[in-house]
């Protein structure tokens, strides 16, 4: 039972997060930041694509 | 005879429903075809078919009450996942195009990480499933909105279904052309597309409006595409011998 639960969690981790957790984490973090800015009255639609381009630049520069 | 038939049809409701649904149907078909061409048709079509079945069950079960489905939350979940997948694909697509150029006509059916597919490719399945379900629900909402306001639900539904069928037929007709595009380029293109859809839906899902509405989606494709091409040029300049292999 425990092994199955572990396999289940590992499957979803691998499926969603893949081999780079920083890239996967950037998406919800940038969405949360955009929402927070929006609540403060700032137009923040640009934040998510900007964060996406930023994390990809870092990833590609790492080689 | 024609007047007797078309006299009962609300042309305005049909046209409005058809045009608005066509936009959503293009997005739906683009996702299914993009994933199918890049990663294999079996899992992509299986995901699309499953999405359609769920959509059909929801539509038949809830009818006009379907508009109560929290589409905003659905957009946020689907957008987040698509953007995560899209960024991973786009990064790998940039590296593969930089390294292989236009190679890949006869590559094996492998995912961007290089693992061969056996059985169902769950990434393809889920992306197609979510794309079809989300866009299908949006078409259902369009039909319900136009149908309810014009008191011609059947006509609006006919407009929505016609748009979906026509766009799907267009997609089927064009898929052979797409299969001739090198796989490395396709992974890059699908990465651009998923990143754009993911950003668009994710931001809409947290309640923000894009300037220009749906036009922003085209702008996102341009931004991610331009970034990708610039990154490929930089990578090829940094490793010219690798790029020529």
Image (tube, coloured by chain):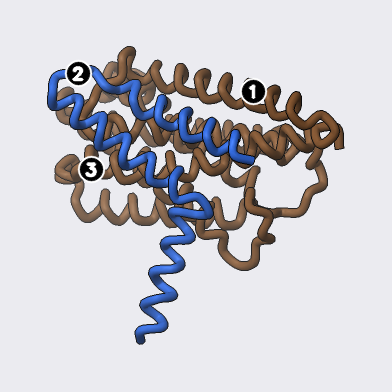
Chain colours: A blue, B brown
Sort mark 1 into few (<14), some (14-19) or many (20+) by Cα contacts within 10 Å: some
Task: Give the Cα distance between marks 3 and 1.
Answer: 33 Å
Image position, residue A17 (x, y; %): 45, 53
Residue at numbered disc 2: A42
Query: To which residue does mark 3 refer?
Result: B73
Query: How much space separates mark 2 and mark 3, taking CA atoms?
Result: 21 Å
Q: Is residue B116 left or right of residue B217?
A: right
Choose between B211 and B158: the one closer to the eye. B211
Q: Which residue occupies 18% across, 25% down? A: A38
Q: What secondary structure is marked by label 2?
A: loop
Count how many numbered circles sit on residues in the image: 3
Per the image, the residue denoted by label 1 is B229
- Chain letter of disc 3 in the image: B
Please indicate, yes or no, whether residue B7 appears anywhere in the rendered image. no
The residue sitting at 40% across, 81% down in the picture is A4
Q: Are marks 1 and 2 in contact (CB under 8 Å)?
A: no
SS at mark 1? helix
Is residue A5 depicted above or below B51 in this figure? below
Quadrant into which the N terminus of chain A falls: bottom left
Q: Residue at x 25, y 33 (%)?
A: A33
Please identify the quadrant where the C terminus of chain A is shown: top right
Q: Percent from the top left, x then y, of residue B17?
A: 31, 25
Labels 2 and 3 touching (C-beta < 8 A): no
């Amino acid at each position: 039972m425990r092994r199955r639960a572990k396999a289940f969690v590992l499957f979803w981790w691998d499926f969603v997060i893949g081999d780079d957790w920083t890239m996967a984490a950037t998406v919800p973090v940038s969405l949360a930041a955009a929402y927070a800015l929006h609540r403060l009255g700032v137009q923040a639609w640009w934040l998510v694509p900007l964060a996406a381009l930023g994390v990809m630049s870092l990833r590609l520069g790492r080689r | 005879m024609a007047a007797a038939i078309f006299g009962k049809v609300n042309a305005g409701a049909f046209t409005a429903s058809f045009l608005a649904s066509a936009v959503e149907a293009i997005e739906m078909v683009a996702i299914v075809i993009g994933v199918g061409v890049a990663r294999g048709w079996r899992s992509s079509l299986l995901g699309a078919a499953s999405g359609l079945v769920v959509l059909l069950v929801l539509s038949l079960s809830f009818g006009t009450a379907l508009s109560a489905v929290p589409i905003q939350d659905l957009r946020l979940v689907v957008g987040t996942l698509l953007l995560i997948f899209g960024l991973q694909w786009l990064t790998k697509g940039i590296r593969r195009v930089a390294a292989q150029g236009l190679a890949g006509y006869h590559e094996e059916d492998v995912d961007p990480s290089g693992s061969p597919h056996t059985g169902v490719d769950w990434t393809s399945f889920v992306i197609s499933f979510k794309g079809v379900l989300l866009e299908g629900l949006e078409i259902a909402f369009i039909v319900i909105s136009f149908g309810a306001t014009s008191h011609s639900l059947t006509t609006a539904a006919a407009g929505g279904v016609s748009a979906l069928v026509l766009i799907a037929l267009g997609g089927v007709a064009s898929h052979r052309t797409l299969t001739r595009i090198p796989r490395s380029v396709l992974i890059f293109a699908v990465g651009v597309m998923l990143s754009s859809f993911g950003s668009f839906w994710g931001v809409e899902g947290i309640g923000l409006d894009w300037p220009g509405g749906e036009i922003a989606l085209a702008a996102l494709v341009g931004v991610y595409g331009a970034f990708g091409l610039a990154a490929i040029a930089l990578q090829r300049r940094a490793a010219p011998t690798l790029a020529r292999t």
